[in-house]
């Protein structure tokens, strides 16, 4: 059953759009990932994330893609990297993540509402 939350709870989660400016595969972890640098605009800046979606994406295909990410979670140690944001996606039929992307170009840093 889905837990019901208040709108005020939703407002605490800061989901922003950013453009991937760097993507490098990291095979040093148990589950391979891609280390991303994402530009969230002048106010937020460039943040790093480690995302486990090597099954559906190549690093070179991710450059200049816009993605949605939670920017206000505490940083998380993932192997030898501190992940600063959580990139968002939905599972496909194989339970592998598919990125959430706007279907139009949005200014970096735009907040989901």
Image: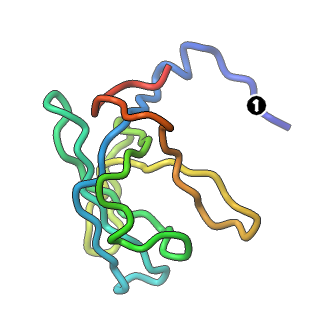
**Image point (53%, 46%), residue name:** 100
Residue identified by numbered label 1: 3
Where in the figure is residue 73, as x and y percent of width and height? 38, 41
**Image point (29%, 29%), residue name:** 107
Question: Would you place residue 22 above or below residue 27 in this image?
Answer: above
Q: Residue furthest front?
A: 104
**Image point (74%, 24%), residue name:** 4
Q: Residue furthest right?
A: 1
Q: Residue furthest left?
A: 42
Hey, which quadrant is residue 68 in on the image?
top left
Q: Residues within 10 Å of mark 1 (few under 14, many from 20)?
A: few
**Image point (31%, 67%), residue name:** 35
Viewer-closest of 71 and 110: 110
Question: Would you place residue 65 above or below residue 33 in this image?
Answer: above
SS under mark 1: loop
Task: Tell me if 97 is positioned left or right of 80 in this view.
Answer: right
Where in the figure is residue 60, as x and y percent of width and height? 33, 71
Task: Tell me if 6 is positioned left or right of 78 in this view.
Answer: right
Question: Would you place residue 111 above or below residue 30 in this image?
Answer: above
């Amino acid at each position: 059953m889905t837990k019901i939350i208040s709108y005020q709870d939703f407002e605490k989660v800061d989901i922003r759009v950013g453009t991937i400016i760097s993507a490098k595969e990291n095979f040093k972890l148990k589950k391979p990932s891609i280390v991303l640098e994402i530009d969230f605009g002048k106010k937020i800046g460039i943040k790093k994330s480690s995302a486990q979606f090597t099954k559906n994406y190549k690093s070179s295909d991710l450059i200049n893609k816009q993605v949605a990410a939670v920017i206000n979670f505490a940083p998380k140690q993932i192997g030898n990297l501190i992940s600063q944001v959580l990139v968002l996606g939905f599972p496909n039929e194989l339970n592998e993540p598919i990125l959430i992307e706007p279907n139009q170009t949005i200014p970096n840093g735009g907040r989901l509402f």
